[in-house]
Amino acid sequence: MKAKPAELILSLAVFILGIGVAVGASQLSAAGGYARVGPNVAPAVIAGGLILLGGWLAYEALSGGWRNAVPDDPVERGEHPFHVAGFVWVSVGLIAQIFLIHTAGFVLAQATLLTCVARGFGSKKFARDFAIGVILALAVFLFFVKLLNVNLPAGWLRPLLGGAGI
Amino acid sequence: MPDAFSSLLHGFSIALTPLNLLWGFIGVTLGTFIGVLPGVGPALTVAMLMPLTIRLEPTGALIMFAGIYYGAMYGGSTTTILLNTPGESASIATALEGNLMAKKGRAGPALATSAIGSFVAGTIATVLVTLLAPVVVELALKFGPAEYFALMIFAFTTVAAVIGSSTVRGLTSLFLGLLLGVVGIDSQTGRSRFAFGVPELLDGIDVVVLAVGLFAVGEALYVAAYASRLEEKMEQLKGSLWMSKEDWRRSWPAWLRATAIGFPFGSIPAGGAEIPTFLSYATEKKFTKHPEEFGKGAIEGVAGPEAANNASVTGALVPLLTLGIPTSATAAVLLSAFQNYGIQPGPLLFQAQPDLVWGLLASLYIGNVLLLILNLPLVGIWVKVLAIPRPLLYGGILVFATLGAYSLHQSVVDLIILYVFGLLGFVMRRWDIPVAPAVIGLILGPLAETQARRALAISQGNSAVFITQPISATILAISFLLLIVPVIVRVMRRS
């Protein structure tokens, strides 16, 4: 039986996370008042759990792989091999939205997100996707701002939106 | 406390006001619409639609949520049957026979038996909730912090260790959730923990952000990477929607048996609707007079698991409402919806806000009826939703998912956390780590910590308090056995 590198790395990540939490917990106050249990106790318990679980996972990874896990071969799972562009485009959309929402505003940020995600799922019609994104996001924007009284950032489209939003 | 019947009648008088009826109707419709989307389960549906209720008063909002909760499940079964893409693990059993029925051109009766079965099971289960909840409340009023803590440990054990394919991966997920739960201000001492000087983290991490990150962003990343270039085959909805006499005759015993299986699983905090759906499937396979049809599209194989799912999900409202303990990811998101209104479910809620509780329970009956009326006639519309091209569909889902996370606090930090949780969700999906325990751990962890510290404060720091009180000791012992016995059995079998 051979070790599975990806599973081993994840196991060690859980283990190291546990160590990190333990270090963090040791810096928290131990003063607990009547309960004699301070804010440090729960993190310490969690740290212990993560360290044990990381070790257990590592043991499984080294002795034939995690038990009852899905097959490593995507085809065996009924899927296709890892599609880099698909993953990257969805990520680009989400990260772009983070930067755009407080600058370009909600409508343009969400339209960009929709366009990038659609690209990640194989769409080639950018203009159509963006147009649909703008219409959808504009409808949501107006619904939230005008009807629900929940403010969303108007951004660059403020002149067109007649002062709605923030 | 007045008896359940008069309380319920009072509840109906609240739920049946035109405005509340309207919220229920909107909830059911939107819940079904979003729930139909492939890959969107009930937990994500409730999380995504949360911002819609920001400005509603609590009773109306919770009535709307009840509608969303039920609608999402109905919508999910439509997708499962027509597309064979179960949106959640509790739908896998339905997918087995339901999709095969659709392939044989019997999609109509499959959808009908699942809708009517859900109605029957949901209604019976709601009656049982109505009768059981006041009893549990009476019992729960006698519980102290030690008992609550023990019950929460029990819920953790069943959710993380007993359900799912691997105890160690379930527990890992739970502990990740517990870790996220300690981020922010400690409610007992006011000190900040693991906030790293980020002011947005002081309030803690919102369950909605975690649920949306794991279920929507993680799912989108995963599908884009591994399944976006697959041909998807949708079964056509042709022929009659109606069930034949034979279909009825074979369906109703399955519905009733499944209700009997599903409800107890939901109502003791034994977590999740997955086990009862598979139990029901196995039961129907055993009882059927047509064993040759199983594996080729047997109607009992749809009727049973669907009804079991609904009964168990409804049963889960008992621990949620009476004890404040969620036993599924969906219930965890619902609990966070309660908390957004400053409402902490538990026995005291039944006394403090009877209007809200009984209005909600009454609206469950109404929601079930609304769904039955809506779902079958409108199935043509739901099918059209499924025909939206995948790229636009996932783009749209993420637009609404990020909206749900952003509109909580209008914060970019939430969007950054959302993406990080998305990456985590991707890894968990790829390496078969269940996500529900993390969601439950995040919301239940801080509550368990509070109860433990209260119990210890009462006992002046004597930690034996958890094992010297009989109820707490018993529950903890059962939890411990549930955790340890399967491991021992496995080790003994190997040697």
Image: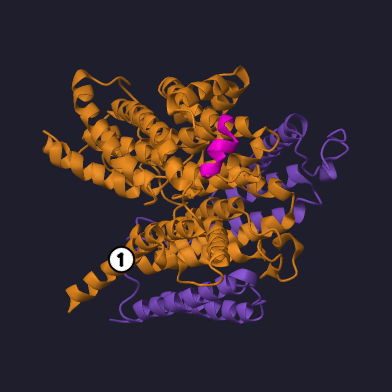
Type of amino acid at the residue the image marks with label 1: Leu
Examine the structure image and report whether residue B407 is included in the region drawn in magenta. no
Subunit ID for the residue under disc 1: B
Q: Colour of chain A?
A: purple
Tint applied to chain B in the drawing? orange
Residues drawn in magenta: B346-355
Can the viewer see residue A85?
A: no
Seen in the picture, residue B46 relative to A94 is either above or below; the reply is: above
The verdict on residue B351 being magenta is: yes
Q: Residue at x 36, y 35 (%)?
A: B82
Q: Specify whether B483 is left or right of B330.
A: left
Q: Would residue B330 be found to the left or right of residue B266 on screen?
A: right
Rendering coords of residue B421 (x, y %): 58, 60
Q: Residue at x 61, y 77 (%)?
A: A25
Residue at 51% across / 72% down in the picture?
B462
Which residue shows up at 27% across the image and 29% down it? Answer: B105
Is the stretch drawn in magenta largely helix, strand or loop? helix
Q: Nearer the viewer, residue B199 or A70?
A: B199
Identify which residue, A105 or B447, lies in the foreground. Answer: B447
Sort mark 1 into few (<14), some (14-19) or many (20+) by Cα contacts within 10 Å. few
Whether residue B312 appears in this view of the structure is yes
Secondary structure of the residue carrying numbered label 1: helix
Q: Nearer the viewer, residue B9 or B55?
A: B9
Q: Position of residue A115 (x, y in %)?
A: 64, 47
Residue behind mark 1: B481
**Quarter holding the C terminus of chain B?**
bottom left
